[in-house]
Image: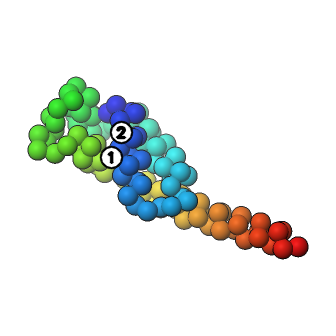
Amino acid sequence: MREAASFTQLQQWMESWNLGAALEDTYTIARRLIRVHLAQPTPAQQTLIEMLLTSDAQVVKPDEPIQQQIVAVLLEMLTREDWQTIATAASQSIAERVMTEQTQAKTAIV
């Protein structure tokens, strides 16, 4: 998978999740997890990745845009544990931002 293209599609896909302030932290974690999987893809993932890399046309599923095919590969690649890690990163990011804002508000009042 072309890393830049796959990560652009990942970011666009994740933006549709309405993560708000947690997007950047969550996206960073997702990219790290994908890089780990790209280092050692399963045979099925390797086949899909090679097909996506070798053509700008829709090779895997001609009736689907390449962006949808990239999302399909990402869905196949990420495990349940990966999704839990991504969800935890999103919630921790929001919690940290809330606590930081609360602390700053108290400091401003004093």
* Foreground residue among 36 and 24: 24
Where is residue 5 drawn, in percent x and y?
Answer: 35, 35
| Left or right of 25 in this view: 107 | right
Mark 1–mark 2 CB contact (< 8 Å): yes
Residue 50: x %, y % from top left: 24, 30
Name the residue that disc number 2 marks: 6
Q: Residues within 10 Å of mark 2 (few under 14, many from 20)?
A: many
Which residue ends up furthest to the right in the rendered image? 110
Instruction: Select label 1 or label 2 by which is in front.
Output: 2
Q: Residue at x 42, y 47 (%)?
A: 11
Q: What residue do we see at 35% from left, 44% from top?
A: 9
Report whether residue 95 is seen.
Answer: yes
Q: Nearer the viewer, residue 90 or 34?
A: 90
Image quadrant holding the C terminus, namely: bottom right
User: Can you say whether 45 is above or below 18 in the image?
Assistant: above
For label 1, count other residues whose C-alpha is less than 10 Å away and answer few (under 14), some (14-19) or many (20+). Answer: many
Q: Quadrant of the N terminus?
A: top left
Residue bearing mark 1: 74
Question: Callout 2: helix, strand or loop?
Answer: helix
Q: Amino acid at mark 1?
A: Leu
Q: Which mark is residue 95?
A: none
Is 46 on the left-hand or right-hand side of 59?
Answer: right
The residue lying at 54 percent from left, 58 percent from top is 22
